[in-house]
Image (cartoon, rainbow, N blue to C red):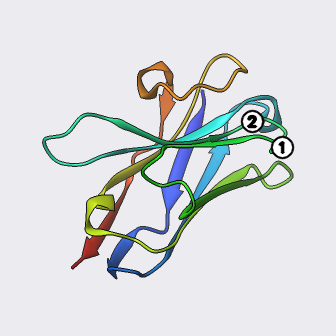
């Protein structure tokens, strides 16, 4: 059973930074791509970014490109999301997610496993 546990959310002012972390367990972490997704109240689930199993390839939503950075440590079974220059529209619950297949996807509905989520609130 894949388990994903996020941490690092909180309240930050516009222009601030947060670093989210996700600890994974339950299967070989290094064999699969990982993603970050978010969902704001009353809005659809949204793709934020993803990283390939090796960490050599990363993918970002246009809305966060240049501000967010995904990284992973396969030795520690963790994936991180560094968020800089935060905006009020980044406010959402952020989820770490992965799939039952190896390939990366930018479709937020193609992720099979989710963490419990961590709240990020950006005040204006």
In which quadrant is the C terminus drawn? Answer: bottom left
Residue that appears at 52% across and 50% down: 5
Describe the element under mark 2 as helix, strand or loop.
loop
- In this view, the residue in front, 93 or 28, is 93
Q: CA distance from mark 2 to mark 1?
A: 6 Å
Q: Position of residue 119 (x, y in %)?
A: 33, 61
Q: Position of residue 12 (x, y in %)?
A: 34, 80
In the rendered view, does 19 fall on the left or right side of 14?
A: right
Residue tagged 1: 56
In the rendered view, does 40 fall on the left or right side of 117?
A: left
Estimate how packed mark 1 is, as few (under 14), some (14 to 19) or many (20 or more) residues with alpha carbons within 10 Å.
few
Residue that appears at 41% across and 67% down: 9
In the rendered view, does 3 fall on the left or right side of 47?
A: right
Q: Position of residue 123 (x, y in %)?
A: 23, 77
Estimate how packed mark 2 is, as few (under 14), some (14 to 19) or many (20 or more) residues with alpha carbons within 10 Å.
many
Residue 72 numbered mark, or none: none
| View extreme (left): residue | 42
Contact, mark 2 vs mark 1 (Cβ under 8 Å): yes
In the rendered view, does 2 fall on the left or right side of 71?
A: left
Describe the element under mark 1 as helix, strand or loop.
loop
Residue that appears at 50% across and 25% down: 111
Residue 52 numbered mark, or none: 2
Q: Position of residue 98 (x, y in %)?
A: 58, 31
Q: In the rendered image of this protein, does residue 66 appear above or below residue 34? A: below
Residue that appears at 36% across and 73% down: 10
In which quadrant is the N terminus drawn? Answer: top right
């Amino acid at each position: 059973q894949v388990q994903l546990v996020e941490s690092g959310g909180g309240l930050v002012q516009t222009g601030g930074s947060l670093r989210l972390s996700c600890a994974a367990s339950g299967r070989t972490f290094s064999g699969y791509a990982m993603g970050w997704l978010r969902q704001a109240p009353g809005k659809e689930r949204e793709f934020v970014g993803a990283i390939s199993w090796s960490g050599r390839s990363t993918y970002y939503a246009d809305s966060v490109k240049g501000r967010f950075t995904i990284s992973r440590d396969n030795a520690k079974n963790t994936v991180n999301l560094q968020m800089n220059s935060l905006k009020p529209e980044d406010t959402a619950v952020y989820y770490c997610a992965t799939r039952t297949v190896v390939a990366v996807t930018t479709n937020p509905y193609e992720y099979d496993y989710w963490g419990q989520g961590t709240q990020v609130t950006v005040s204006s």
